[in-house]
Image (cartoon, rainbow, N blue to C red):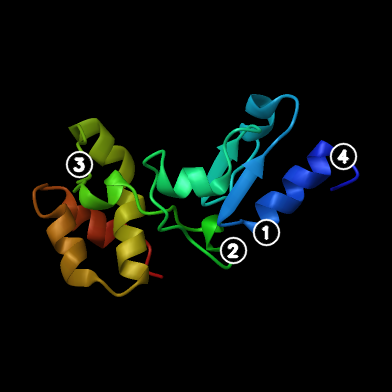
Amino acid sequence: MGDSVNACISFINDLAPEHLELMVRDPITVLEKIRNAGTVCVGDYTPAAVGDYATGISSTLPTGGYAKYVSGLNVDHFTKKMSVQVLTRDGWTALRTSSVRWRRSRGCLDTQRQCCGGFNEAHALERDSPRY
């Protein structure tokens, strides 16, 4: 029990419980504000035990407040994802100076040259860029 629904939501998000049974008048509105819980069982007829053993949701859930950082075991853990980046020449031109400076500031000169290798302007960029 809390002083208000918002106080309870704040407490829940800080606690990041493994299981949360949400029994309020307007569960969907409250659910939209919950960010940190391993699993949320909504309504009077959805106890955590049913959520674990009968509705098909994994009972491998983050404990000890780790729901702030990770989700419970789910199908996404068994899929492979890959990120892809594509720049146009104009996009590269807009980003290359900051990219070269960032790499240089971290001592990554070889990677910096690889980064600029496809462009004739790379040598001029290296020559004209301020040294940090």
Q: CA distance from mark 3 to mark 1?
A: 36 Å
Q: Which residue is mark 1?
A: 15
Q: Residue at x 16, y 48 (%)?
A: 121
In the picture, measured across the screen, residue 69 lies left or right of residue 76, that is right
Tell whether label 1 touches label 2 (CB within 8 Å): yes
- The reply, left or right, for residue 20 in relation to residue 55 is right
Per the model, the C-alpha gap separating discs 4 and 3 is: 45 Å
On screen, residue 106 above or below 77: below
In the picture, measured across the screen, residue 125 lies left or right of residue 42, that is left
Residue 87: image tag: none
Q: Position of residue 120 (x, y in %)?
A: 10, 48
Q: Quadrant of residue 83?
A: top left
Q: Earlier in the sequence, mark 2 or mark 4?
A: 4
For marks 2 and 4, give the CA distance: 22 Å
Going from N to C along the chain, the mark reached first, 4 or 3, is: 4
Q: CA distance from mark 4 to mark 1?
A: 16 Å
The numbered dot on residue 84 is 3
**What's the distance in space between the residues labelled 2 and 3, CA to CA?**
33 Å
- Marked residue nearer the N-terminal end (3 or 1): 1
Q: Amino acid at mark 1?
A: Leu
Locate the C terminus by quadrant: bottom left
Contact, CB < 8 Å: mark 3 with mark 1? no
Q: Dot 3, crowdedness within 10 Å: few (<14), some or many (≥20)? A: few
Q: Which residue is mark 2?
A: 65
